Image (cartoon, rainbow, N blue to C red):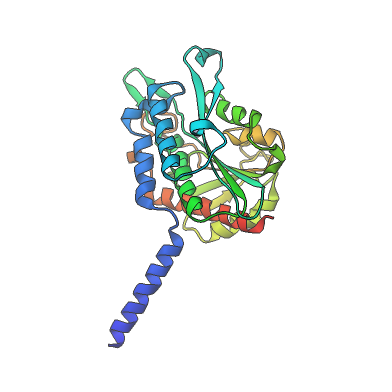
Amino acid sequence: MKTITSFILLLFCCLAFHSQAQKMDTRVLLEDIQFLSSDQLEGRSATSEGNKKAANYIIERFKDLDLSSQFPEYTQSFSLNKRLEQLGTGENIIGFVPGSASSKIILIMAHYDHLGTKGKDIYNGADDNASGTAALLNMAAYFKKNRPLQSILFAATDAEEEGLLGAKALLKDFPFPLNQIQLVVNMDMISRSEDNTLYAVGTRFYPQFKPYLEKSGERSAIQLVFGNDGAKGELDWTNASDHGPFHKEGIPFIYFGVADHKDYHKPTDTFENIDQTFYRQACELILNSILEIDAAME
Ligand SMILES: [Zn+2]
């Protein structure tokens, strides 16, 4: 009898821990990254058919979640650079969850475009950046169910690989006064790491967020490392992805990403080569960081 009671107690503890540790639906998260990096999306380069399929997938998910948006069909169109402008426009996909307590905004970003195809090779871009895009979709699902205090704008950006064009367009035509943005969280390459390390870039400039990141980092099985924000002798990733244009305007950002790996910008950046355990943990860590920050900011 005693054994059974202990067993039931243990089971309850496990379940409680499990539900506390897992805020996102892992199955959906993996389905999303697998679809977004599948061959049928042909590497999602800006203006391509595969890119449109990715955009439509994100739009459908935002519709299913009944997110609001400041843009018709969740779509902010923008003109591209000289090389691409003949081929079409870029499309940022934007969803919105209003906060319950504040008009301040947390902007969560991830670019969904990638390099497309070269000859027979498909650049699937599973880590870069189907990983961040799928994380964004599942965070939108979480915050739709669990209303945040600050408003959250979810921006799946296009044409990052062409020079951060989607992020620049979003900054230029941001649907709210820029001073309402408390923080930009950018996710770009978060699904694999040989040394189990996720970087949080930006605290050199915006140290006010560091304690909350440390708190969620301590609760994670992966290592959260600060830096790569251009201090002496360090790498500088402050303009390496979509957070760059916002940082240049003095808008606080935290960029989450991993170190470049052997499959970076190669046709081998595939779903099979991500680390599912690391990815799930990275997503939870980032979500927990956002929750800590949302709870602490007024
Ligand atoms: Zn990227």
Residue located at (61% from left, 54% from top)? 100
Residue 218 picture quarter: bottom right
Q: Position of residue 47 (x, y in %)?
A: 45, 21
Q: Is residue 161 in sight in this rendering?
A: no
Residue 4 picture quarter: bottom left
Label count reads: 0
Q: Position of residue 185 (x, y in %)?
A: 58, 43
Q: List the single residue furthest toward the bottom.
A: 1
Q: Is residue 167 in sight in this rendering?
A: yes
Query: Looking at the picture, does residue 240 appear above or below residue 11?
Result: above
Residue located at (65% from left, 53% from top)? 210
Query: Looking at the picture, does residue 133 appear above or below residue 84?
Result: below
Relative placement, left or right, of 68 versus 4 is: right
- 105, 35: nearer the viewer: 105
Residue 180 picture quarter: top right
Relative placement, left or right, of 27 versus 232 is: left
Q: Position of residue 3 (x, y in %)?
A: 29, 84
Residue located at (45% from left, 43% from top)? 137
Q: Position of residue 136 (x, y in %)?
A: 48, 43
- 145, 290: nearer the viewer: 145
Quarter of the image containing the C terminus?
bottom right
- 140, 74: nearer the viewer: 74
Quarter of the image containing the N terminus?
bottom left
